């Protein structure tokens, strides 16, 4: 990807002390974008009311201008300035899930910069649970526009070091809040009309339906590539996402068949003298011993039984594949309900929807 040129700078990774949060807030007030920990993934935060600062986010990430950003607030009252159409349903959702990993798309208010919403008449808002994110928003004295702090198209960052890997030299600092507990981005729920899930996340369809007492469908873009007609509703979903450099293929198969497939692939493509391009498995913990037996290298990202653990590790694992210089990867992906849907969604996008059913 060709990145927009910006004046290079030294990027500091700073402990989130009071003093450093004050320093980060000062950078934000001067119009810069800084790395900020949240409970989901790290964000690249700038003043949501300053169009030039918001432009700086798009530039630093190389993000397409038509992909809108999420506005982060520190208390629910701030919602009134940012969005309109705050119905009792919105209050119900906020009471149940804020602070936390739910983003609400609402009719736009007048307070935020136009480029935050990429020209749409709606705005995405989230009240994060991470204490450092909340302290930074308060200290900056303004709501913060913050996409995930990765280069556009690469896996979202779940540590301050990941942010530095992608954005070193392009931002002044990252506050280091350690590894993100959730590990995948927030659930994006549009409540502009009837509620619809634009991006699955840690807050599940079942939980939303429980609170709203009605069925909450996924947008078409969640499980399939986005068609042109759907693009205006869910702009972020049309771009390639979360992808390491390797070609990933998801294999929907029982453990044995999965391992067998990779073993056969190796026989067909490699000799013992040339194993430099050998494929890697991106697998569940339980499959690792079977892969070991066959001499297949792997990166595991959690137990088959534990979707939350998979979520916490998936982006870390995708970045590890790059570090291992993987070129061909065969992945196991969860099926089923709850947070597993969100993990599968990230893997589908990382694999450009290449799935083989065995
Ligand atoms: O957990 C998260 O949501 C993280 C942390 C940093 O808060 N942020 C994040 O931002 O994932 P980003 O920019 O990587 O993803 C925002 C998603 C995109 O898919 C974007 O298209 C969608 O939200 N979005 C933002 N504003 C929207 C709007 N007005 N209408 C529809 N979708 C919107
Ligand atoms: Mg992102």
Image: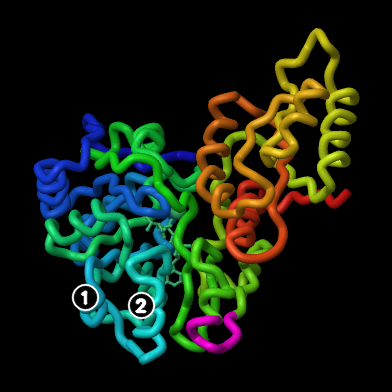
Task: Say whether mark 2 is within 8 Å of ligand 1.
Answer: no
User: From what the image shows, is residue 339 above or below residue 228?
Assistant: above
Residue name at image x 25 percent, y 42 percent: 175
Q: Residues within 10 Å of mark 2 (few under 14, many from 20)?
A: some
Task: Name the outermost residue toward the top.
Answer: 273
Q: Residue tagged by mark 1?
A: 78
User: From what the image shows, is residue 74 above or below residue 146?
Assistant: below
Residue name at image x 12 percent, y 54 percent: 29
Question: Mark 2 or mark 1: which is in front?
Answer: 2
Whether the magenta-drawn stretch holds residue 213 is answered as: yes
Q: Point out the quarter of the image occupied by ligand 2.
A: bottom left
Q: Bounds of the magenta span?
A: 210-216
Whether the magenta-drawn stretch holds residue 200 is answered as: no
N-terminal of the two: label 2 or label 1? 1
Question: Quick one: 336 or 222, which is closer to the camera?
Answer: 336
Residue name at image x 40 percent, y 51 percent: 148
Label 1: element kind = helix
Q: Residue tagged by mark 2?
A: 94
Task: Say whether mark 1 is within 8 Å of ligand 1.
Answer: no
């Amino acid at each position: 990807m060709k990145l927009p040129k910006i004046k290079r700078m030294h990027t500091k990774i700073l402990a989130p002390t009071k003093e450093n949060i004050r320093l980060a807030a000062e950078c934000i007030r001067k119009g810069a974008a800084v790395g900020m920990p949240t409970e989901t993934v790290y964000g690249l935060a700038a003043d949501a009311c300053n169009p030039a600062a918001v432009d700086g986010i798009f530039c630093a990430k190389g993000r397409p201008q038509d992909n809108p950003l999420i506005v982060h607030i520190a208390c629910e009252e701030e919602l009134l300035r940012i969005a309109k159409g705050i119905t009792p349903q919105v209050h119900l959702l906020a009471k149940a899930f804020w602070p936390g990993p739910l983003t609400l798309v609402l009719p736009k208010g007048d307070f935020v910069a136009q480029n935050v919403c990429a020209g749409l008449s709606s705005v995405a808002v989230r009240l994060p649970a991470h204490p450092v994110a909340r302290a930074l928003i308060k200290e900056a004295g303004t709501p913060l526009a913050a996409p995930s702090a990765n280069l556009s198209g690469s896996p979202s960052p779940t540590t301050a070091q990941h942010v530095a890997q992608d954005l070193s030299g392009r931002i002044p600092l990252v506050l280091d809040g350690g590894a993100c507990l959730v590990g995948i981005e927030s659930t994006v729920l549009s409540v502009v009309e009837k509620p619809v899930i634009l991006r699955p996340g840690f807050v599940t369809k079942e939980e939303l339906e429980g609170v709203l007492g009605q069925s909450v469908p996924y947008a078409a873009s969640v499980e399939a590539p986005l068609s042109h007609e759907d693009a205006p509703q869910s702009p972020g979903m049309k771009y390639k996402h979360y992808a390491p450099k390797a070609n990933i293929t998801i294999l929907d198969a029982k453990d044995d068949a999965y391992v067998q497939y990779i073993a056969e692939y190796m026989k067909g493509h490699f000799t013992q003298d040339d194993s430099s391009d050998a494929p890697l498995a991106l697998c569940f913990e339980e499959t690792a011993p079977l892969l070991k037996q066959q001499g297949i290298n792997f990166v595991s990202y959690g137990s088959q039984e534990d979707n939350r653990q998979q979520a916490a590790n998936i982006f870390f694992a995708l970045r590890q594949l790059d570090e291992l210089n993987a070129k061909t990867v065969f992945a196991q992906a969860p099926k089923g309900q709850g947070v597993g849907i969100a993990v599968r969604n990230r893997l589908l996008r990382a694999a450009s929807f290449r799935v083989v059913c065995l």
